[in-house]
Image (spheres, helix red, strand yellow):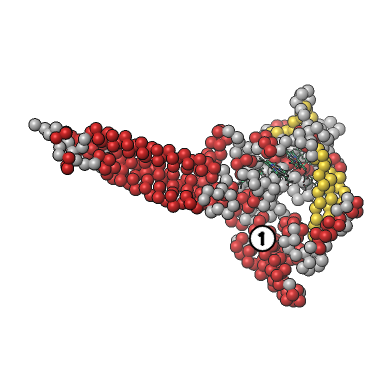
Amino acid sequence: MPPSRSAAPDGQRDRPGFVLLTSHWLTRLGLVLVITAICTWLFFLPAGHSEHGGENPYRGLVVYLILPSVFALGLVLGVIGVFAGRKRIRDRLAAGTLNSATAVRGLIVFLAVTLAGNLLIGSQASYRAIQYLETPQFCGGVCHSERPEFVAHRDSNHASVACAECHVAPGQAGWIQSKMNGTRQLWQEITNTYERPCPPALASGRLVPSRETCEHCHWAQKIVATRLLLIPSYAEDERNTVSYTVLLMLVGGTRMQGIHNAHFAGGYEIRYAASDAMRETIPWVERRNTRTGETQTYLADGTKADQAAGLDKHTMQCVDCHNRPTHDFLLPGRALDRALALGRIPNTLPFVKKEGLALLKADYASNAEAAWKIPEAIAAYYAKGYPQIAAERPADVAAAGKAIAAVYDRNVFLDQKVTWGTYANNLGHVDFPGCFRCHDGSHETSDKKHAINQDCSSCHEVLAQDEESPAILKKLGVWDHIEAMKSR
Ligand code: HEC
Ligand code: HEC
Ligand code: HEC
Ligand code: HEC
Ligand code: HEC
């Protein structure tokens, strides 16, 4: 007579949960992974959830991505192990050492507990993971390829606007698209196969249209009217003589004449075709009245209509002018002028602009080398040429060296092949072609009657150009403030 299941003496029964969890090596491995993940997670938790500031980017990677993945893997292995070990379990059931009712109850309890654990950790982790994936720390802190953009962003008027606000289209589709791009980038990062320098997002066709990003916070309808720009520049003479350019920008708005109005006034749409990926050369421009359907086409001097026909057409949007609202990389002269104007470099050190410029333009093997060579060269320059200054103002000399090295580190990223001028800023026409890609006077209608306007005063009133003490600033009553700031 086969032993009835209930007949097995209590002492010989296995604990059912124990049998399930130890019946196969995969289950045992899964268990180890789950426990390790939970313990590590508990260990990391008290370090705080701050998404901002100087948090180590790798901490987020571990807490929000790696640990939950290990946890989930452990559970999956556990289930596979139970499945793979089902024969052994069945044997024990048959042998009567295991009570099937208790085993099933044990299994249900086990599944309920792990499911609850999974939901708790999973929902917490995935919520945090999603938040974390949107932070600048993840976007720019983990990927070396994005370091230049990360550094520039931190130093811009958009520092508190998350990367995703400008780079991810709203809604689920945009989110999924961005995570697919992110996965590809992560793979390129791991295998070290990403492009250097990283191509501008407009050039690679990956930039989300401005309408879905910029225009959530800004809008062309806003009446800006005018903006007064004061641009200081320092000469390369002994005194670092400062002069000012004063521009009154005629920004306008869609309901007011001006720059924004000219490109976005109700019913008008401007399209253009570029012959290079960076959109630097624009042979074809069209302005269309969407209400009447009337179009005006401008061709650059020497372009034939059929040459432009095969090129991709782009509808003009905010980022065609404001392409560097947050990742602005300056040319060396401008970057130094800014550091001098902000007082980071003491402008009373003789020839500091000239020396700084030469050092910024020199060749270095790495950013790390520039970081010590530049301060050393500045110290050596004053020790040799101006020993009295070197002796009396060592703090100023050191500050200048440090600040010039910081200017280098803010704009040049040798490991990413980003150097002076790699990324053009299209808002202007002095450092890069910018507005003059179209407004160069050579883009004409076929009857030659009309050219895209190059009249200086259609975009701005040049109130002063490179003047040491512009009369206009005195008239506006701001000169005293500027003098006071200079003497500080
Ligand atoms: C205010 C909007 C805005 C924010 C915020 C922003 N970006 Fe960008 N980003 C842009 C625009 C516009 C471009 C396209 C520049 C071009 O094509 O000339 C761009 C381009 C890039 C590029 C391509 C390389 C380049 O310089 O063109 C990378 C990489 C990048 N951004 C990363 C980031 C990271 C990382 C963050 C967050 C730390 C971030 N961006 C935040 C607007 C933004
Ligand atoms: C999440 C909101 C947000 C988004 C998205 C955003 N901005 Fe801004 N932007 C701001 C804030 C905040 C400021 C700072 C306001 C100020 O300076 O008064 C600003 C300032 C600006 C300025 C003036 C600052 C200056 O340096 O003169 C420009 C131009 C600008 N943004 C363009 C853009 C463009 C172009 C985009 C899209 C690529 C964009 N912004 C996306 C919030 C945003
Ligand atoms: C044809 C080029 C061009 C286009 C296209 C353009 N802008 Fe501007 N925008 C300018 C110029 C030039 C200025 C003045 C820059 C300055 O003062 O430094 C300006 C100034 C601004 C400012 C700062 C003024 C303020 O509000 O204080 C914002 C914000 C701005 N633009 C947003 C936008 C948005 C949003 C779009 C897209 C709807 C857009 N711009 C499209 C050229 C353009
Ligand atoms: C892709 C080509 C293109 C670019 C780039 C471009 N514009 Fe224009 N812009 C046009 C066209 C087309 C018109 C309409 C034709 C005209 O009125 O001359 C126009 C008209 C204007 C006008 C009105 C001129 C008038 O006669 O009243 C202003 C002002 C202007 N743009 C400013 C700018 C500024 C500032 C920039 C750079 C930040 C810029 N544009 C960049 C194509 C462009
Ligand atoms: C299509 C519009 C447009 C036209 C035409 C134009 N400018 Fe400008 N200009 C700009 C913009 C935009 C800036 C950059 C403003 C900024 O820095 O934000 C600029 C900047 C400047 C600056 C400042 C340079 C600096 O040091 O940063 C000077 C000087 C200047 N323009 C002179 C002129 C003169 C002279 C003409 C006529 C030959 C002219 N511009 C025609 C749009 C225009």
Judging from the image, what secondary structure is the residue with disc 1 in?
A: helix
Q: Is residue 394 left or right of residue 128?
A: right
Q: Is residue 205 left or right of residue 61?
A: right
Q: Report ligand 3 position as a quadrant.
A: top right
Q: Is residue 164 left or right of residue 96?
A: right
Work out which quarter of the rendered image holds the N terminus and state it: top left
| Image quadrant assignment for residue 204 | top right
For image coordinates 40% across by 50% down, the residue present is: 39
| Image quadrant assignment for residue 19 | top left
Query: Height in image: 383 above or below 68?
Result: below
Q: Is residue 181 left or right of residue 446?
A: left
Q: Is mark 1 within 8 Å of ligand 1?
A: no
User: Of the residues shown, which amino acid type is indicated by label 1?
Assistant: Ala
Query: Height in image: 44 above or below 437?
Result: below
Give the percent coordinates (x, y) of residue 85.
26, 39
For the question of whether residue 173 can be seen, the reply is yes
For image coordinates 75% across by 58% down, the residue present is: 342
Q: Residue furthest left?
A: 1
Q: Residue furthest front?
A: 10
Mark 1 residue crowding within 10 angstroms, few (<14) / some (14–19) / many (20+): some
Give the percent coordinates (x, y) of residue 256.
82, 34
Give the percent coordinates (x, y) of residue 446.
81, 31
For the question of whether residue 193 can be seen, the reply is no
For image coordinates 75% across by 45% down, the residue present is: 427
| Image quadrant assignment for residue 88 | top left
Front residue of this view, candidates 182 and 25: 25
For image coordinates 30% across by 36% down, the residue present is: 107
Per the image, the residue denoted by label 1 is: 406
Give the percent coordinates (x, y) of residue 326.
67, 47
